[in-house]
Image (cartoon, rainbow, N blue to C red):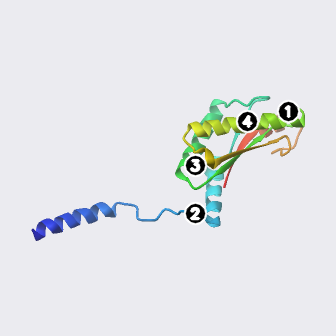
Amino acid sequence: MILKNTAIAFVALFMLSGCNTTPRPEIMTPAMEESYVADFEKNIGDRVWFGYNKSDLSPEAKEQLSKQAEWLKKHDLMKATIEGHCDERGTREYNLALGERRAESVQKFLLNQGIVSNRLDTISYGKERPAVMGNDESAWKQNRRAVLVVK
């Protein structure tokens, strides 16, 4: 009987030793947030690009967003704001609406990947915050984007 109880205790101890005993944090500290943001920007990438006058996602954008969704699933304390941006062509009002459609396209994709809606906000900056200054296709291409800002 003692041998049987000892064996059971040993098996239970062995099984528990394989469990992750590190407690999962319930809140995000500023240091954790800074570390996660840096990891996201460096290893995943925070943006996708759009065609001229477009808000639909290209295959490349969907591939990038899939990586972002996987990262967000692993870091479920993080929230994000999806920024929609445009190049300088068009009116302010038109570009704000286009930026909103771009941000919403990204949001819809991430929701379909299983990210909970209360973790995602959207905002449109239209043409007000260019990533690159310039009046040529090279600059415009980089400014037609959506940026996922994790926080």
Q: Nearer the viewer, mark 3 or mark 1?
A: 1
Q: Position of residue 136 (x, y in %)?
A: 87, 34
Which residue is identified by label 2? 27
Label 3 and label 2: CA atoms lie apart by 16 Å
Residue at image location 78% in from the left, 37% down from the top: 99
The residue identified by callout 3 is 72
SS label for mark 1:
helix
**Res 102 label:** 4
Tell me if residue 11 comes above or below residue 137 in the rendering: below
CB contact under 8 Å: marks 4 and 3 = no
Location of mark 1 (residue)? 94
Structural crowding at the residue carrying mark 1, measured as other residues with C-alpha within 10 Å and reported as few (<14), some (14–19) or many (≥20)? some
- Residue 132: image x %, image y %? 83, 44
Between residues 133 and 101, which one lies in front from this camera angle? Answer: 101
Three-letter amino acid code of the residue under disc 3:
Leu
Of marks 3 and 1, which one's residue comes earlier in the chain? 3
Residue 67, quarter of the rendered image? top right
| Number of numbered tags placed on the structure image | 4
